[in-house]
Image (cartoon, grey):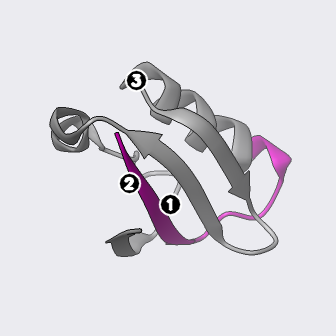
Amino acid sequence: MKKYKVSIQGMTCTSCEEHVTTALKNIGAKDIKTSYRERKTEFDLADTGIYFLILPQRAYNKVEEIKTV
């Protein structure tokens, strides 16, 4: 497992947080912490899981940055 921190533009409410968290759970992410106020999410994910990290474009403008910790 690797720890990821992702900046996300376009989240405006707790519903946005829930959508991001659900998408990450669906690809096997663990220890997910998403904040629309901070415009970021942090999570643990197996190396192979990152290939399935697709956030819906309709809800979020872009994934700005992904870095492992």
> At 38% across and 54% down in the image, what residue appears?
57
The residue drawn where x is 69% and y is 53% is 34
Taking the spot 71% from the left edge, 47% from the top edge, the residue there is 17
The Cα–Cα distance between marks 1 and 2, rounded to whole angstroms, is 5 Å
Give the image quarter of residue 65.
bottom left
Q: Residue at x 50, y 60 (%)?
A: 60
8 falls in the magenta region: yes
Figure quadrant of the N terminus: top left
Amino acid type indicated by mark 1: Tyr
Q: Residue 12, position in %: x, y?
A: 76, 64
Left or right relative to 39: residue 65: left
Query: In which quadrant is the C terminus drawn?
Result: bottom left
Q: What amino acid is labelled 2 in the image?
A: Gln
Magenta part of the chain: 1-15
Disc sitting over residue 8 in the figure: none
Q: Mark 3 or mark 2, which is nearer the start of the sequence?
A: 3
Residue 3 belongs to magenta span: yes
The residues tagged by marks 2 and 3 sit, at their Cα atoms, a distance apart of 20 Å
Position in image of residue 61 (x %, y %): 45, 69
Q: CA distance from mark 1 to mark 3?
A: 20 Å
Which residue does the numbered mark 3 point to in the structure image? 28
Residue nearest the viewer, comparing 63 with 59? 63
Query: Which residue is tagged 1?
Result: 60
SS type, badge 2: loop
Residue 46, horizontal then vertical, whole percent = 29, 35
Q: Nearer the viewer, mark 2 or mark 3?
A: 3
Q: Amino acid at mark 3?
A: Gly
- Report the side of 13 relative to 31 (left or right): right
Dot 3: within a 10 Å radius of its alpha carbon, few (fewer than 14), some, or many (20 or more) residues?
Answer: some
Give the image quarter of residue 54: top left
Marking on residue 57: 2
Whether residue 44 is situated above or below residue 41 in the rendered picture:
above
